Image: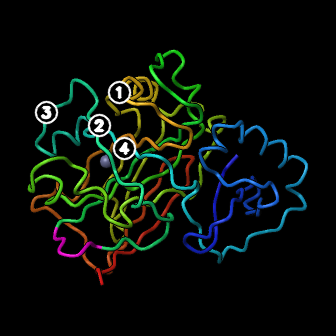
Amino acid sequence: MKLIRFGNPGQEKPGLLLEDGRRIDVSDFGQDYDEAFFGGDGLERLATWAAANEATAPTVDESVRLGPPLARPSKIVCIGLNYADHAKESGAEIPKEPILFFKATSAIVGPNDPIVIPKNSVKTDWEVELAFVIGKKASHVSEERALEHVAGYVLHNDYSEREWQLERGGQWVKGKSCDTFAPIGPFIATTDEIPDPQDLKLWLKLNGELIQNSSTQQMIFGVRTLVSYVSQFMTLLPGDVITTGTPPGVGLGFKPPKFLKPGDVVELGVEGLGSSRQIAQAWK
Ligand code: ZN
């Protein structure tokens, strides 16, 4: 299944993107895509409901805004420098253990909402990433059982303010958490649709020019390892998002560096997970 949410910001309703491309409203299923849904066998119940009701469910028009495909989770855990080439372009060492940092959940927006360049920002940058959603509470999970705790996969742009991340002291979270810095979607694909998360192409274009173009084969620590690893330090709750790091081609890596300015168009995608598009806007 492909889970979507649609409607105005803060008022999104749950839906599904069907195989034939039709978007349907599943409000009658009676539950939003939140912690209780993912943790309460929601995907199984929704599949049963959809089999009986998708033909007659209301269609959602193409013109309707897509929101993030899940309600605000308890946390977004980010993995840093998880592609060797990106570590190199950032002038960093290849990590021996996964680098973890948080991103505020208030940064989450729909996949095609504008990216707002924050007040006083001069180094707003992009990062196409494969993210995944936890489906089952995970604490001290083994690698063997790790993937049982994943509900699905989703496209994410881990926007980053490099000055605030790297030049202002303390933790990266300062440069990762601004409003609109986490466009998620268009949809969450359930795990049956993504048989191998370590074999997906991912790409990003800035104003039509392809500048990130890689594969999740290049990840240093794969999804299976990451679920197990993160669960040694905190309990992952159903609906939590883990975003797995970005390949080379971020603005920071260019000589001279490139950062977003109002009007820039950012388009990105992960194989099997659709694409998204954000237009940069000045803060006001
Ligand atoms: Zn990132």
Q: Which residue is drawn at 34% across and 75% down?
A: 280
Stretch in magenta: 117-122
Q: Is mark 1 within 8 Å of ligand 1?
A: no
Determine the image quadrant of residue 157.
bottom left
Q: Which of marks 3 and 1 is nearer the N terminus?
A: 3
Residue denoted by label 4? 214
- Residue on which disc 1 sits: 233
Looking at the rendered structure, the kind of residue marked 2 is Leu
> Of the residues shown, which amino acid type is indicated by label 3?
Glu
Horizontally, is 96 left or right of 56 in the view?
Answer: left
Nearer the observer: mark 4 or 3; the answer is: 3
Q: Distance between the residues labelled 3 and 1?
A: 23 Å
Is the C-beta separation of discs 1 and 2 under 8 Å? Answer: yes
Find the distance from the CA under tag 4 to the CA under tag 1.
Answer: 29 Å
Nearer to us of marks 3 and 1 is 1
- Which marked residue is nearer to the observer: mark 2 or mark 3? 2
Question: Total number of numbered labels?
Answer: 4
Using the image, determine if residue 129 lies above or below residue 144: below
Mark 2 surroundings: few (<14), some (14-19) or many (≥20) residues within 10 A: some
Amino acid on which the number 1 mark rests in the picture: Phe
Give the answer, above or below, for where 75 lies relative to 208: above
Q: Which residue corresponds to mark 3?
A: 93
Q: What crowding class fits label 4: few (fewer than 14 Cα within 10 Å), some (14-19), or many (20 or more)?
A: many
Tell me the CA gap for discs 4 and 3: 20 Å
From the image, which quarter does the C terminus lie in? bottom left
Q: Which of marks 4 and 2 is nearer the N terminus?
A: 2
The residue beneath circle 2 is 100
Query: Label 1, label 2: how many angstroms apart (C-alpha)?
Result: 10 Å
**Does label 2 or label 3 sit earlier along the sequence?**
3
Asked whether disc 3 touches disc 1, contact meaning CB atoms under 8 Å apart, the reply is no
